[in-house]
Amino acid sequence: PSGISFSFQEGVLIWTFSTKKYVYGELYQNRARVSNNAEQSDASITIDQLTMDDNGTYECSVSLMSDLGGVSKSRVHLLVLVPPSKPDCSIQGETVIGNNIQLTCQSKEGSPAPQYSWKSYNVLHQERQVTAVTGQTFSLKNISTEMSGYYICISSNEVGTESCNITVAVRPPSMNVALYAGIAGGVAAALIIIGIILYCCCCRDTGKAEDTDVARPNRAAYREPPEQLTELSGRQEEEGEDDYRHEDQRDAGRETPDQAGR
């Protein structure tokens, strides 16, 4: 043969008879090699360190020096076997009575593609019958408390099996109402307590200010009320008239020496 070419999406390896040199594709450098009998019509190749990216169909093309117009081709399908990775399980939707929820399960790796199956157990760990469910999604409609328990998703292929568990606890709607009511009540109580504290602090500050004003009056600015001043002035005038009358009576009762001799 004049040359051998292996291809898979991009070049894997090219061997030319005349130069006896190999040209490797970027993804297969240091991983692919041709058998030692390539010149004797054995064009087998070996690929090391296989990954899922190597899955696919490979084509071998051979051109002959004596038949430059024709090319012989052969194809082979490669399937790399990889056991499933541990699946990720989750719940979509709220587990409230009457709701619809979905249980999901997915393995990120696995070749061939994993197949999925489900099992269900009640809260007493007793297995219960479920309809034949295959696939990554298990739908539960109009859920009730009897559906509480745990569900097992099994991911498997030809070379392995993995699983994950999902716990489902169905609750009544009233629990949501009670939760919101409790939060609202707690916030209201906190606001009332804060208001009482602020009110007490304000009253205390006002009382201190009043006590200070009573203990230290401004005596210079203090004046008797007009009523008291009028009454006091009247009393002083009456007392003055009484003193004047008494003085006249005393003067009238006295006799001069001339009057006494007469």
Image: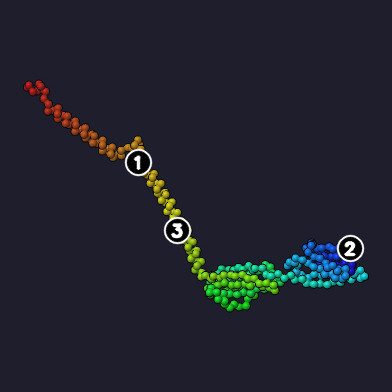
- Image point (68%, 68%), residue name: 109
Q: CA distance from mark 2 to mark 3?
A: 91 Å
Q: Amino acid at mark 1?
A: Ala
Residue closest to the far right: 66
**Discs 3, 1 touching: Cβ within 8 Å:** no
Q: Earlier in the sequence, mark 3 or mark 1?
A: 3
Q: Which residue is mark 3?
A: 189
Q: Is residue 243 left or right of residue 18?
A: left
In the structure shown, which secondary structural element does the residue marked by tag 2 occupy? loop
Of 99 and 247, the residue lying toward us: 99
Mark carried by residue 86: none
3D distance between C-alphas at marks 2 and 1: 118 Å
Of marks 2 and 1, which one's residue comes earlier in the chain? 2
N-terminal of the two: label 2 or label 3?
Answer: 2
User: Residue 69, can we see it?
Assistant: no
> Percent from the top left, x then y, of residue 114?
68, 72
- Seen as rendered, the residue at the extreme left is 262
Disc marking residue 19? 2
Label 1 near label 2: C-beta < 8 Å?
no
Q: Position of residue 127 (x, y in %)?
A: 57, 76
The residue drawn where x is 55% and y is 72% is 149
Q: From the image, which quarter does the N terminus lie in?
A: bottom right
**In the image: residue 110, left or right of residue 63:** left
Within 10 angstroms of label 2, few (less than 14), some, or many (20 or more) residues?
few
* Identity of the residue drawn at 70% across and 74% down: 158
- Residue kind at label 3, given as amino acid type: Ala
User: Which one is closest to the eye, mark 2 or mark 1?
Assistant: 2
Q: Which residue is mark 1?
A: 215
The spot of residue 146 in percent (x, y) is: 53, 75
Q: Would you say 250 lies left or right of 91 here?
A: left
In the image, residue 247 sits, relative to residue 137, either above or below, namely above
Name the amino acid, label 2. Answer: Thr
